[in-house]
Image (spheres, rainbow, N blue to C red):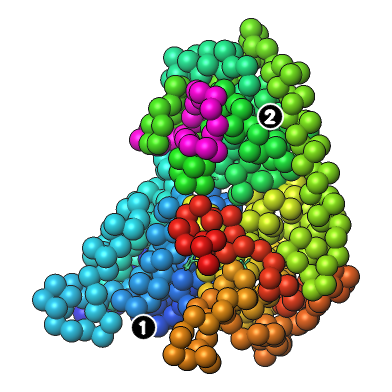
C-alpha cells in the first residue's frame, strides 16, 4: 500500500445511515436493539441523535408514528430482523391506515441466504412481507445508495397522502466501506418533501357553488386537517363562512372544543339534518357510517371533499364537489372565494336549531357529570380529567379502550391542535404507551394517557421506558376489572370455577407496576382523590400511574360499537 491509500479516509454503511438521517434534520430514533441494529443505535447516540429504546417494537413504532403525525416529518423506528420487524409491522400498518408518516428501518439477513431459504438467524423475506402493509418499501443493497434510499423513504412517507414506509437494510450493507468523500457526496437532502398541491380553479368554483346553494351546511374536520398544520386557514374558513363544524376525535382542539360554532354536542342532529357537508381531511369510513344509513338521516346530502388523495373521492358515496390538493391551499382558495362576495352565512334558523339542541344536550350531560356515584363511573372520573385539561390546555391526551375511549372523546374538551392521540382509524388497542412516549418526547409537555384496563395491558411494560427516560407521562387506568365491563359470568357448564372470557383479576393494582421502576403510583376511588393525584403528578412532572377504580357495572359491551356487535344485548 502506498502512503496515499493509507491516508484515504473511509466511511461505512453504519455512518452513512446516520449521516443521511441527520442530513435531513431527523434527530430522534425510536427502537429496540439487537445485532446489527445495536451498533447503529449506539452510533446514532454518539453522533448526537436522541435514541429512545423500547421494550417491544410495536410501541417504538407507535411512538415514531405519532411523532410523524405531530411534526410532518417521518418518525423513525429501528428494529432487528424477522420477529423484531414483525412486531414493528403492526405499528407501520396502523400508521399507514391513519395516514401518519413514519419509516420502519429493520436490519435483515443476507439476500443469498434468504432467497435460498437456508435458515439464517431470524431469517425472513421482510421486504415482501412489508409491502401490503405500507405505502412503499425499499431495500438498499449498496452503501453508496444509502443517501438516495433514505431520501426516497422520506419523500414517500410525507408526500401526497402520508403513510408508513419500510426500509430494509441487509447486515452486509452496514459493514460495507466507502471512500468518505464519495460517501459524503452520496447524501441527499430532500427538497420540498411535501410540496403544496394547489386545487384546480374549476374545482374550487364547483365547491363554492355547492356551498352557496346550501341551506344547512356542515363542516367535518378530520385528523388530516389537524395534520396539515393549516390551523389559521381552517379557523378563517369556519369563522368567515359561519358554518357549524364537527371535529373527528383527533381533530378536537384544532379549534377549541368550546368554540361557538362547534356542533359536537348536537352531533346526531347535524349529521341527520345537514344538506351540504364539507369534509376536510376526513374519510367517509366506518367512523362516519360510510356516509349513509341512519346516522345521516333522510335529508339528501351533497358532499364537498377536500383531500390530497384523488382516489379517496367517491369511496363510499358520490361526492358532488371534490377538491384535490393540500388542505392549506384548498382551504385558502375557499376563503378567497368567500371573501370575493356572493356567499351568505347559514340562516339563523339552522344555527339556532343547532344551538337549541346543544343547550339541551349540554344541560343533560352536565347533570350526569355532576353525579358522584360510589364507586366512580366513567363520567365522574372523566369530569376531573376534563377540568384538569381545561386548566392546562397544553397537556397531550392519549386515549384508548372502549367505554373509556368513547366517553373521554365526548367529555374531555381540547383547546389546542394535535394534542389528542387515540385508537384512530382501526380502533386499535395498544397505542397507549407508545403514543404517550412519542408525544412526551416530541412536545416536551405533559401527557395524560386515559386507558381502559384492557387497553393498557397491550403496552403496559413500556412503563419502564417512561421511567427510564423520566418522561412526564401520567397514565390513568380506568380499572373496571375486565375487557369492557368486569361483570361477565362464567358460561362453562362443566367448570363453575372457569374464568369469564372478558374478566381480569379483580381489584388489580396497576399503580404497583410503576413503583417497580421508580415511578409514582396512586390508587384512587373518588373524584377528589383522582383530582389530587393528577395535580400532584402534573406538579412533579414525574412518571405516574393512577389506578382509578371504576364501577365494574358501568359502561356497555364494545362501548358505542354495539351496532357492530351482533351478540350484544342478546345475553
Ligand atoms: P378522521 O379519522 O379524523 O376522520 P381520516 O384519517 O379518515 O381522518 O382522514 C384523513 C384524510 O386526510 C386522508 O384521506 C388523507 O388523505 C387526508 N390528508 C392528510 N394530510 C393531508 C393534507 N396535508 N392535505 C390534504 N389531505 C390530507
Ligand atoms: C389490537 C378489541 C376493542 S376495545 C377492547 C378490545 C380488546 C378493550 C376494551 O376494554 P377496556 O375498556 O380497555 O378495559 P373499557 O373502557 O370499556 O373498560 N385487539 C386489538 N385491538 C382491538 N380493538 C381489540 C383487540 C377491543
Q: Residue at x 57, y 13 (%)?
A: 213
Q: Residue at x 52, y 42 (%)?
A: 288
Q: Is residue 449 left or right of residue 161?
A: right
- Which residue is nearer to you in this view: 459 or 500? 500
Asked if residue 431 lies in the magenta stretch, the reply is no
**Does 427 sit above or below residue 487?**
above
Q: Residue at x 41, y 66 (%)?
A: 90
- C-beta proximity under 8 Å, tags 2 and 1: no
Q: Residue furthest top?
A: 342
**Does 157 sit above or below residue 37?**
above
Viewer-nearest of discs 2 and 1: 2
Q: Which mark is residue 244?
A: 2
Q: Is residue 193 visible?
A: no
Residue at the spot of label 1: 35
SS of the residue under disc 1:
loop
Q: Where is residue 290 drawn, in percent x and y?
A: 45, 40
| Image: magenta residue range | 291-313
Q: Is residue 498 left or right of residue 242?
A: left
Amino acid at each position: 500500500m502506498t502512503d496515499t491509500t493509507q491516508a484515504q479516509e473511509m466511511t461505512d454503511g453504519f455512518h452513512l445511515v446516520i449521516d443521511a438521517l441527520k442530513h435531513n434534520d431527523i434527530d430522534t430514533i425510536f427502537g429496540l436493539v439487537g445485532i446489527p441494529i445495536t451498533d447503529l443505535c449506539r452510533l446514532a447516540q454518539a453522533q448526537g441523535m436522541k435514541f429512545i429504546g423500547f421494550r417491544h417494537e410495536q410501541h417504538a413504532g407507535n411512538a415514531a408514528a405519532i411523532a410523524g403525525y405531530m411534526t410532518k416529518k417521518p418518525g423513525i423506528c429501528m428494529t432487528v430482523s424477522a420477529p423484531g420487524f414483525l412486531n414493528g409491522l403492526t405499528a407501520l400498518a396502523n400508521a399507514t391506515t391513519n395516514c401518519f408518516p413514519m419509516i420502519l428501518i429493520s436490519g435483515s439477513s443476507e439476500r443469498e441466504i434468504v432467497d435460498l431459504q437456508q435458515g439464517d438467524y431470524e431469517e425472513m423475506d421482510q421486504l415482501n412481507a412489508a409491502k401490503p402493509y405500507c405505502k412503499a418499501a425499499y431495500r438498499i443493497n449498496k452503501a453508496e445508495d444509502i443517501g438516495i434510499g433514505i431520501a426516497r423513504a422520506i419523500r414517500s412517507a410525507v408526500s401526497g397522502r402520508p403513510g408508513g414506509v419500510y426500509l430494509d437494510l441487509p447486515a452486509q450493507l452496514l459493514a460495507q466501506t466507502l471512500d468518505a468523500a464519495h460517501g459524503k457526496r452520496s447524501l441527499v437532502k430532500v427538497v420540498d418533501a411535501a410540496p403544496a398541491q394547489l386545487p384546480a380553479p374549476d374545482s374550487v368554483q364547483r365547491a363554492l357553488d355547492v356551498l352557496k346553494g346550501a341551506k344547512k351546511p356542515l363542516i367535518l374536520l378530520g385528523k388530516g386537517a389537524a395534520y396539515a398544520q393549516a390551523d389559521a386557514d381552517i379557523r378563517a374558513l369556519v369563522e368567515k363562512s359561519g358554518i357549524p363544524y364537527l371535529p373527528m376525535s383527533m381533530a378536537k382542539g384544532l379549534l377549541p372544543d368550546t368554540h361557538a360554532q362547534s356542533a359536537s354536542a348536537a352531533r346526531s342532529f347535524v349529521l341527520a339534518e345537514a344538506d351540504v357537508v364539507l369534509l376536510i381531511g376526513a374519510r367517509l369510513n366506518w367512523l362516519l357510517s360510510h356516509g349513509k344509513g341512519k346516522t345521516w338521516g333522510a335529508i339528501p346530502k351533497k358532499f364537498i371533499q377536500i383531500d390530497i388523495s384523488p382516489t379517496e373521492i367517491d369511496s363510499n358515496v358520490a361526492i358532488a364537489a371534490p377538491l384535490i390538493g393540500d388542505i392549506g391551499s384548498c382551504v385558502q382558495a375557499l376563503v378567497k372565494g368567500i371573501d370575493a362576495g356572493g356567499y351568505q352565512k347559514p340562516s339563523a334558523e339552522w344555527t339556532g336549531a343547532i344551538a337549541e339542541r346543544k343547550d339541551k344536550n349540554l344541560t343533560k350531560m352536565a347533570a350526569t357529570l355532576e353525579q358522584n356515584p360510589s364507586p366512580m363511573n366513567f363520567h365522574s372520573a372523566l369530569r376531573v380529567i376534563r377540568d384538569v385539561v381545561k386548566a392546562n390546555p397544553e397537556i397531550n391526551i392519549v386515549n384508548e379502550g372502549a367505554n373509556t375511549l368513547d366517553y373521554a372523546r365526548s367529555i374531555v374538551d381540547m383547546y389546542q391542535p394535535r394534542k389528542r392521540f387515540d385508537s384512530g382509524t382501526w380502533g386499535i388497542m395498544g397505542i397507549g404507551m407508545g403514543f404517550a412516549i412519542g408525544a412526551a418526547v416530541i412536545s416536551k409537555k405533559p401527557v395524560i394517557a386515559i386507558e381502559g384496563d384492557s387497553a393498557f395491558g397491550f403496552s403496559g411494560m413500556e412503563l419502564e421506558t417512561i421511567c427510564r427516560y423520566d418522561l412526564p407521562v401520567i397514565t390513568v387506568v380506568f380499572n373496571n376489572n375486565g375487557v369492557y365491563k368486569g361483570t361477565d359470568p362464567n358460561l362453562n357448564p362443566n367448570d363453575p370455577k372457569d374464568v369469564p372470557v372478558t374478566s381480569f383479576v379483580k381489584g388489580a393494582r396497576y399503580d404497583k407496576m410503576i413503583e417497580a421502576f421508580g415511578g409514582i403510583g396512586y390508587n384512587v376511588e373518588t373524584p377528589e382523590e383522582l383530582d389530587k393525584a393528577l395535580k400532584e403528578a402534573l406538579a412533579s412532572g414525574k412518571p405516574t400511574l393512577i389506578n382509578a377504580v371504576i364501577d365494574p357495572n358501568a359502561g356497555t359491551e364494545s362501548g358505542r360499537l354495539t351496532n357492530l356487535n351482533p351478540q350484544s344485548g342478546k345475553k
